[in-house]
Image (cartoon, rainbow, N blue to C red):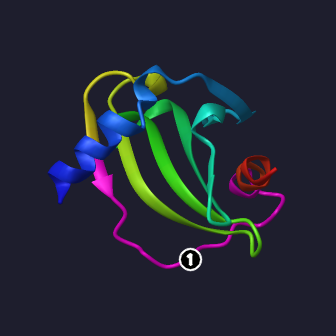
Amino acid sequence: MKILLTLFVLLFCNVAYAEWYKLSADKNFDHYIEKESIKKVDGFVYYWEMIDLKERTQGKDLSIQVYKWVDCTLIRFKTLIYIFYDNNMGMGAAEIQESEIKDWKYDPPDSIGGYAMNYACK
């Protein structure tokens, strides 16, 4: 399954060369969305987000890209894929992981995740 997931990410979601739009920033990280990745399919929206960290997570990652599946009607999401990078802005060595949690999740509308979902749904 990991091989198929890797091929999907590398061939169809070319996030390595994406143009990221900054949604927010604070002292710990900058939060981006890749506008060109926003796709509407059968009433759902799919897109890439990136968290660009100011400091490494447990001495390892500096940025994380997340592929989301959003139900715009109920404002809920599922995370499908995570890509962890050892450098900022999705650069350097990457580790791809399929999401282990398959349930729908909800972000408050005034949160960073809620803002990203509302942006993608419009």
Q: Is residue 120 left or right of residue 38?
A: right
Residue 71 in picture, x, y percent from top left: 67, 69
> Which residue is the extreme one toward the front?
42
Closer to us: 24 or 15: 15
Quadrant of the frame with the N terminus:
bottom left
User: Which residue is painted at 74% across and 65% down in the image?
Assistant: 72
Instruction: Determine the main secondary structure of the stretch shown in magenta.
Output: loop
Closer to us: 15 or 51: 15
Q: Residue 71, can we see it?
A: yes
User: Which residue is painted at 43% across and 60% down in the image?
Assistant: 80
Look at the picture and state if 46 lies above or below 95: below
Residue 23 in picture, x, y percent from top left: 74, 36
Span shown in magenta:
96-114
Residue hosting label 1: 104
Residue 40 in picture, x, y percent from top left: 65, 53
What is the tally of numbered marks visible in this picture? 1
Question: Identity of the amino acid at label 1?
Answer: Trp
Look at the picture and state if 117 lies above or below 29: below
- Figure quadrant of residue 45: bottom right
Residue 107 drawn in magenta:
yes
Look at the picture and state if 114 lies above or below 34: below
User: Which residue is painted at 72% across and 55% down in the image?
Assistant: 117
User: Which residue is painted at 47% across and 31% down in the image?
Assistant: 55
Q: Is residue 92 left or right of residue 24?
A: left
- Figure quadrant of residue 88: top left
Q: Residue 60, can we see it?
A: no
